[in-house]
Each structure stands twice: as structure tokens, then as C-alpha cells.
Amino acid sequence: MTSKQVKPLSGAVRTSAGAVRPLAGVRITGGLLHHWQRRNGTATIPHTIEQLRAAGNVANLSRLLEQDPAPYRGRYPFLDTDLYKTLEGLAYELGDGRAGEPVREFFDEVVGLLERVQAEDGYLNSFFQDPAATKKPWEDLSWGHELYNLGHLIQAAVAAARRMGDERLLRVAERFADLVVERFAHDGVCGHPEVEMALVELYRETGLRAYLDLAAAFVDRRGKGQLKHSIFPGDYFQDHLPFRELPSVTGHAVRMAYLAAGAADVYLETGDRSLFEALERLWDDMVATKLYVTGGLGSRHSDEAIGDRYELPSERAYTETCAAIAVMQWGWRMFLATGGAGYLDVFERVLYNAYAVGLSADGKAFFYDNPLQRRPDHEQRSGAEAGGEPLRRAWFTCPCCPPNIVRWMAQLADYVAAERDGALLIASYAAARVEGTELGLAMETAYPWDGDVRLTVERAPGGPYRLVLRVPGWARGASVTVNGEAWQAAPHDGWLTVERHWQAGDEVRLTLPMPVRAHGSHPYLDATRGAASLARGPLVYCVEQQDSPDAAVDDLVIGVPEIVNANIERRDDAVVLTLTAAAAPPPSTELYPELPLEEAPLETTVTAAFVPYFLWGNRGPEAMRVWVRTPDATNGKKAK
């Protein structure tokens, strides 16, 4: 192994003046994100390795070394990708010294198998390399996912090279990528975008322009009829219009966001302005009309698709965990392209809600889809849940989400800070040590549970230097002190800048007020009309039936006074909101009563606790709501 410079997987971007560069010299040392990473190493990764062995992902590779190989195990031809995503997470764990010998042994075993089973021409896929395979390589670009697999292989390989100094996997990935450069020089595109991001990253790692050029070509080939639109129409694949002409994010949610993230990487390297204009238009439309309050993307189960503008049903929200990760990848790249704090606001909303909810509290069970409501009779439609089974599952037939959680959790530190000429930008708040730039800091905070952040200078540059702190859009009245004295500069465009000659020991304290907030929804969003969701800081809250013992969660009604007077308390390592609500059963039993309704009975007063959305579903399958009725949704009766 050779020693490599440690840098984040999102890589070096163009070095033009003012460009934002990701910073890898960050180590998370405490708080919620540290707990998540520790859980990832002690529970989720061992569980994932166990499941990958049990499901046959490892055996699918090793059997190719046998004279008469056993049948391929699994329903889908792209299951190698789950090994690759896991290897990427392991590269971070091993490179940062957080993993032990069993993880190292698994990493070495799988890398060794990949080296041995790779075809002479560089091709690598355990399904299509099977002598008994029903399809030939590259025969089914719409559904074969061979390039999708390559993308995750490259990302794992680059992570291993950068974080571990281990280039064995990189050599495997380069051989496969070189084959793809030759094979797809003039036409062809994968039905599932992902390889675009990876090819740009491989270009950053190797300096070979052919990888970047192919990534750009894949972005521009979509929408030109090169895919067979079987099962679903062209918009499912983002293949009905060229990317630059798409009026809105559309189709399969994960595919769309991966494609956009790859296009953003191409922009970061080429400066293609028309590509950025399309990215900005699509992002703004998504945030304004198609993103759930949790940051989840995708409202349709039938084709895992995004849906129409304002089509955001709560109980049927799909919001796949992989889509949450893809949105964060896209948002981070938009931040690198622009320095815009608003992209980080969305990134953070997704991280603490739509992404975090995908994993159980013990780290060993997963949501694939992430609804914002569970009705009280839902178990009548699921025999397993009627017996009290946990809502999350240990594994899936298509297990794309669990290994994706593993790799993203392992690299959270890469999204804490960035640098720009003469400035350190703090993008996310966590207890951490920030190094790798002229200004070295120790950051202490209990974020996201409270908004007090203390940054202590440990290493100072010789001249003036800017410390730029993100002020989230929800943080009204943010303030900063430097060595105990108020800093007079006000936030601008989501950032608060402190520029001075620094000395070791200087202390900056940022205060982000965190009152309880109530969010309504756009009037076109019919599913949540007359309802409110609660939030505090970056966290969206929900009420589970377990925390509303005196009224059904569907009957709860909350108004402004109740929200303002909510009690904020720390309970079981989380902040819980306890408030008084009205209990208002429907005034009519008819599904479609004639208006005006008959007079409703007086409402009674009850107490309910709201917990962070990402924690729901850990205590059994009962009713849950993110959106709760407001007085506008009742006959306006006051509680007794």
C-alpha cells in the first residue's frame, strides 16, 4: 500500500478563484453524529456484512472461481453493487481507524475476490459473468445496471485509495472503466444513472480526461432514445427529454437525483454554464414543489417516482432512503458550485430527517420507504405487523438502502467544513476537530438538540483569515461573540463572517435560537391542507400513538397558543416536545357529509409528546403523524 493524501470522496473541484473546496481534515468527536458513526461501526456494519453473506452477495463472486459454479443467488442482476457500497463505507472506517480486524478481513476477502474474478478485458459483474446467465453483457442497458455497478465500484476504489492508501481496488476499477470508455465511446447510456459521479471522481483521482468526457457524454445522451423504455415510459429513466431541457425533476427519484449530482460534478470540472442553469432550475423547482417537509423525495410507490408538483401524500410517501442520500449528494455539489447556504439548509433537513429515519435506533433494521403518516388500521393490511413485528426490516430483496446508509454514515465528517481562498466555511455543526486548513479549530456543541456552538482556535494563520459560519434559514436572531465580546456583523445570504488576526485560544461562540416552529403547506398541496407540522432546529417532529394516550393521533388539533407554549425537554438522549392539544373527533361519521356540517361536539384537552421524526417506529407499529390538524380544519370549537 502507498500513502495517499486524505481527501473527501467529493474530491477536488476546479481551482478557479473563489471555488469552494471540500475539506477532509475533520474528525467528529461527540454528539449525535458521533453516536451515529459509532453505531455504524459497532452494529450496522457487522449486521450488513452478515446479511451480505447470508444473501449470497459474496458467494456470487466466489462461485465464479469454481469449475461448475452454483446458480447466481438473488432476484436482481446488480447485487454486486451492495458489496461496493459497503466497501466504500469500510474504507472510511478503516482509513480513519474506527474499524477492527473482522472488518479488515472482510474488506480484504472481497477485494481479493474481485481481483481474481475480473475478466481479462476488465469486465466485472457476477450475474453476467455466469456461464449460465440468461443475458449477455450490455444486452439490457435499461435494467442490467452494469454501469451503475461500475459507478459504486469506482467510488469504493477511490475511497480506499484516498483514505487507506490501498490501490488494489482502484486498479480493478480502472480496468473496468477503461473497457467502458472504449465500449461506450460513441453511444449508449445506463438505465440507472450513478456512474457519472463516479467517472468524474475517477478523473479527479487519475487525471485521465477520458473519464470526465464520458461522464459528460452520458449526461447529454439521455433523452435521445438510446434506452428501451420497457415496463415504464421514458420519463421514468429521465430519457424523454435531454437533461438540459427538463422542466422539472421527474421519474424514478433515485435515478433523477443521481443524474443531477453527476451533472453537477461535470459542471464543477468543465464550467459548462448551460448545464448549471439546468441544475439550478431543477433544484429550485424540486424544493418549491416536490420535496417533503422532511426533505424526502418521491411520492409514488408504483414506479418509485417523484410525482407531479404538489403531489405529496403523507401516508403514501415513498421517499426512499437512497433518494435522500442522492439529494444530499446533489445539494452538496450545488453548494460547492455556488457557496450557497440554502443548499446546505436542504442538505441538513434531509440528513436529520429523511435519511436518519431509514435506520432503527439499534442500527440493525431499515426503512426502504419513509412515510410521514401511519394510520391506526394499517396493520390490518399487513399480517406481519399485526403480530407486533418491527416496522423496519433487517434486509430486503433489493437491499440498496442498507449499504448506502453504511457508506454515507461513515463519511459524515466530509460534510462539516469547506474552504475558499482565505476562508474556512463551517457548513454543518457537530462536536468535531477541524484541520487540514490554515485555521485549525475545535468545535463543541450539542447540535441539533441546541443551537449553542463554541469554536476554539487551535492553530492560527500568520495573517487575517475569515471564519464563515452558516446561519440556517430557520435561525432567527443568530448572534456571535469573539472572546466574550459581541461581533457586530450581521448574517448575509445565510452566512456570518468573522475576519480577524487569530491567535491560538481565541473563542467564537455562535448562538442559533431554536424555538418550536409550525409549518403549514402550499395551498396546492391538498394532502396537508389545514394541518401543521412541528420543527425545532433542523429536526422535524411527529406524534406517535404511544405518546398520545388520551386521544387518537388523527383527532389531535393544535393551534398557535399550544405551539408557543410547548414544553421542550431532554428525554432519552433526544429533545421531546410536550404540548397541550385539543382532541376533536370528526363531527360526522359520513365520508362525504353535506356542507355545512352539523355542529361539532366540544373538544377536550389532552397532552401529547412529539418526538423527532427520525426516531419513530422503534417502539412498535402504531399510528403516527407528522402533519397534525389545526383549528382551521375543524369547526373552530374551543376546548373545554
Image (spheres, rainbow, N blue to C red):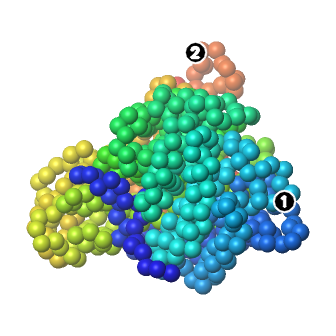
Q: Nearer the viewer, mark 2 or mark 1?
A: 1
Rendered position, 42 above or below 236: below
Residue 160 located left or right of residue 288: right
Q: Earlier in the sequence, mark 2 or mark 1?
A: 1
Rendered position, 451 above or below 58: above
Rendered position, 388 above or below 444: above
Q: Quadrant of residue 479?
A: bottom left
> So how many labels did they put on this image?
2
Instruction: Kindly identify which numbered label has been placed on residue 461.
Output: none
Residue 286 at x, y = what percent? 47, 36
- Give the residue at mark 1: 131
Q: Secondary structure at mark 2?
A: loop
Residue 554 at x, y = what percent? 61, 39
Residue 507 located left or right of residue 299: left
In the image, what residue occupies the spot 30% across and 71% down? 436
Residue 347 at x, y = what percent? 43, 50
Residue 378 located left or right of residue 436: right
In the image, what residue occupies the spot 33% across and 67% down? 445
Within 10 angstroms of label 1, few (less than 14), some, or many (20 or more) residues?
Answer: few
Between 175 and 624, which is closer to the camera in this rendering? Answer: 175
Residue 348 at x, y = what percent? 42, 52
Kind of residue sitting beneath label 2: Pro
Between 614 and 300, which is closer to the camera in this rendering? Answer: 300
- The reply to whether residue 238 is in sight is yes
Between 565 and 100, which is closer to the camera in this rendering? Answer: 100
In the image, what residue occupies the spot 19% across and 55% down? 497
Q: Secondary structure at mark 1?
A: loop
Kind of residue sitting beneath label 1: Pro
- Give the residue at mark 2: 596
Residue 86 located left or right of residue 521: right
